[in-house]
Image (cartoon, rainbow, N blue to C red):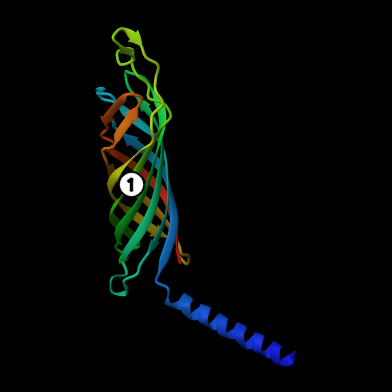
Amino acid sequence: MKKNGKFVLVLAIVMIAMCGTAAAELPPMYAGVDLGYGASFPDFGGNFFPMADGFEMTPYFGINPIKSVQDLSFEFDLQMDFLKYYSSHGDFNYSVITPQLFAVYTYSGWKIKPFIGLGMGVNIINLDKYVYSEYYNTVGGTPVDPHNAENTASFSFAIKGGIQYQIPNTGINLALGLRYNVNSPTVKAGPYSFNVNMGSISINFGALYRF
């Protein structure tokens, strides 16, 4: 029993040492979340001057894997927008989820650190219903009910930038930034199908923690 106890103790010490070594070799990482306001100008059905706006939330995780360029990070963002669409043809709510991969450069030489990032990903639109105007809601003089819309996925490109400020003696950073997304999905609702220009801009405020 004593031999087994010593063996278990030695094994535990070795495992702890290995975990400590592995943790020491990990590159710098960070995680955070941004909250903000987003506005988009999608063209649902050929309307003039439409607009959508609402709440935006973006949790993200980043890693700095290149020792020689420590200000460069690779980041995964999960942008979530909850928007309301306004137009002369009717208002309705919809949501957009956009997982994206970014390359982000944060200049660390100043107390207030500017950053800029380029990313790409997938834009997933969830429309509960597409609301037609009286004109679009009539085919051959016969009223047509609104149709349930299908979820739509499309390629997304994004650029973002802003500033960060690290709270002294902590790993906590406050961030203020702008983000612009570009994508053009095809939306389907019943027998209707059309391309939508979904370019959107948002302003965000958040916090991140650097490990």
Classify residue 53 as left or right of residue 10: left
Q: Secondary structure at mark 1?
A: strand
The vertical placement of 37 against 16, above or below, is above
Q: Nearer the viewer, residue 56 or 137?
A: 137
Indicate the position of residue 62 as horizontal and vertical percent values.
Answer: 39, 61
* Quarter containing the N terminus: bottom right
| Residue 43 visible, this orientation | no
Residue at left offset 66%, top offset 85%:
8
In this view, the residue farthest toward the right is: 1
| Residue 76 visible, this orientation | yes
Indicate the position of residue 208 as horizontal and vertical percent values.
Answer: 44, 57
Q: Quadrant of residue 152?
A: top left
In this view, the residue farthest toward the bottom is: 3
Classify residue 47 as left or right of residue 86: left
Residue at left offset 37%, top offset 33%:
53
Indicate the position of residue 119 as horizontal and vertical percent values.
Answer: 29, 53
| Amino acid type, residue under disc 1 in the picture | Val
Q: Nearer the viewer, residue 30 or 100?
A: 100
The vertical placement of 142 against 104, above or below, is above
| Residue indicated by mark 1 | 122
Classify residue 6 as left or right of residue 94: right
The vertical placement of 193 against 153, above or below, is above
Q: Nearer the viewer, residue 122 or 79?
A: 122
The vertical placement of 13 against 57, above or below, is below
